[in-house]
Image: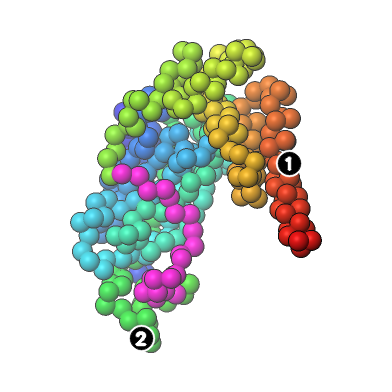
């Protein structure tokens, strides 16, 4: 069961709405992504999009979305300034709030925050974000009343856009859209198919009765847990959702180390491995057995660099 409510205000050239979404029975959400009720601003409908397990990261991911963007008229665009808040139900002053602004259109119909809060912190009921299996997400959204018609607006025109006079950098953003080489700043989300259903069941597999884990990770987890039983023992008193996240994080790191070769350990790959390691540490596993292997993998970058230097030296000698 979910409850939501909103309040509409009009000021200057913006229409603002405060929308609150109570997500009940969070641990039972099976969908890869989850949508709030629809709320309206002027003639257009909006929703909050939630990734309960994170959008390919070990963080809670939350976005603002224009509903049925494919049905919007050609050239439609609206400027919006908004904040998304994860309410701390025990200590309201510790609520997590992030704000941003975006020009929404048919191609960019969603915008928000991929890494709102680490899942390990969110799932800890003592922290106050998930209480009695319920969390509260609030959105404060201010949308321009006038439409920005990108198709009709000429980038060289000197005519001012009234509702963006106070948002000069957003005006620059709109004008730059006509330049196909322009890459807008901000945190674009990973696009998923329009189907809102759960991922195919074949992609997930039960792992020792502890939860559903990505199928590719299960053989790796089985092997290391056979050698290190404390991995499963330390998680048995945790909630099922926390345990799934914990073993998913461990599986990601093990899969990374198994599939990467020495030549693959570039600077970017090392940064990715460091991030996976930092996220895994949050789940309080005993990882003393794994740390040396991770360090060796990180050191491979130096070996690759040294091999490259040696190859260049040989070439110079030749």
Q: Which residue is mark 2?
A: 157
Q: Along the horizontal axis of the image, is 122 left or right of 19?
A: right
Compared with 162, 277 (above or below) is above
Residue in the image at 55% along x and 31% along y:
255
- Circle nearer the viewer, 2 or 1: 1
The spot of residue 28 in percent (x, y) is 38, 24
| Label at residue 299 | 1
Which tag, 2 or 1, sits closer to the chain's start? 2
Residue furthest front in the image: 318
- Residue 193 visible, this angle: yes
**Disc 2 secondary structure class:** loop
Q: Nearer the viewer, residue 102 or 274?
A: 274
Residue furthest bottom in the image: 158
Res 153 → quadrant? bottom left
10 Å neighbourhood of mark 2: few (<14), some, or many (≥20)? Answer: few
In the rendered image, the quadrant that contains the N terminus is top left
Compared with 123, 159 (above or below) is below
Residue in the image at 32% along x and 35% along y:
3
Compared with 232, 148 (above or below) is below
The spot of residue 114 in percent (x, y) is 48, 46
Res 251 → quadrant? top right
Q: Along the horizontal axis of the image, is 256 left or right of 241?
A: right
Compared with 183, 83 (above or below) is above
Q: Nearer the viewer, residue 207 or 24?
A: 207
Q: Main secondary structure of the magenta part?
A: loop
Magenta-drawn stretch contains 171: yes
- Residue 7 visible, this angle: no
Q: Which residues are magenta?
A: 170-193
Magenta-drawn stretch contains 242: no
Q: Along the horizontal axis of the image, is 39 left or right of 259?
A: left
| Label at residue 218 | none
The spot of residue 303 in percent (x, y) is 73, 45
């Amino acid at each position: 069961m979910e409850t939501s409510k909103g309040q509409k205000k009009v000021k200057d050239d913006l229409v603002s709405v405060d929308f609150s979404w109570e997500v009940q029975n969070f641990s039972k959400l099976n969908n890869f992504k989850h949508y709030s009720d629809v709320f309206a601003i002027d003639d257009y409908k909006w929703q909050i999009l939630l990734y309960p397990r994170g959008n390919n990261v070990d963080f809670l991911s939350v976005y603002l979305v224009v509903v049925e963007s494919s049905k919007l008229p050609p050239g439609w665009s609206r400027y919006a300034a908004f904040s998304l808040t994860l309410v701390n139900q025990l200590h309201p002053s510790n609520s997590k709030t992030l704000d941003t602004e975006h020009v929404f259109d048919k191609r960019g119909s969603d915008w928000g925050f991929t890494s709102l809060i680490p899942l390990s912190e969110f799932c800890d009921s003592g922290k106050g974000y998930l209480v009695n299996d319920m969390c509260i997400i609030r959105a404060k959204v201010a949308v321009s009343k006038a439409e920005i018609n990108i198709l009709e607006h000429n980038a060289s025109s000197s005519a001012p856009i009234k509702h963006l006079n106070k948002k000069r950098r957003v005006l620059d953003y709109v004008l730059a859209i006509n330049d196909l080489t322009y890459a807008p700043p901000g945190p674009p989300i990973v696009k998923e198919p329009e189907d809102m259903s759960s991922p195919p069941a074949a992609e997930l597999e039960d792992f020792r009765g502890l939860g559903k884990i990505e199928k590719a990770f299960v053989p790796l987890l089985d092997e290391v847990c056979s050698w290190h039983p404390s991995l499963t023992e330390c998680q048995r008193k945790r909630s099922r959702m926390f345990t799934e996240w914990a073993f998913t994080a461990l599986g990601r790191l093990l899969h990374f180390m198994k599939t990467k070769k020495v030549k693959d350990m570039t600077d970017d790959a090392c940064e990715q491995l460091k991030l996976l390691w930092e996220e895994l540490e949050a789940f309080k596993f005993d990882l003393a057995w794994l740390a040396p292997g991770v360090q060796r993998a990180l050191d491979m970058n130096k070996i690759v660099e040294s091999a490259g230097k040696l190859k260049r030296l040989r070439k110079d000698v030749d």
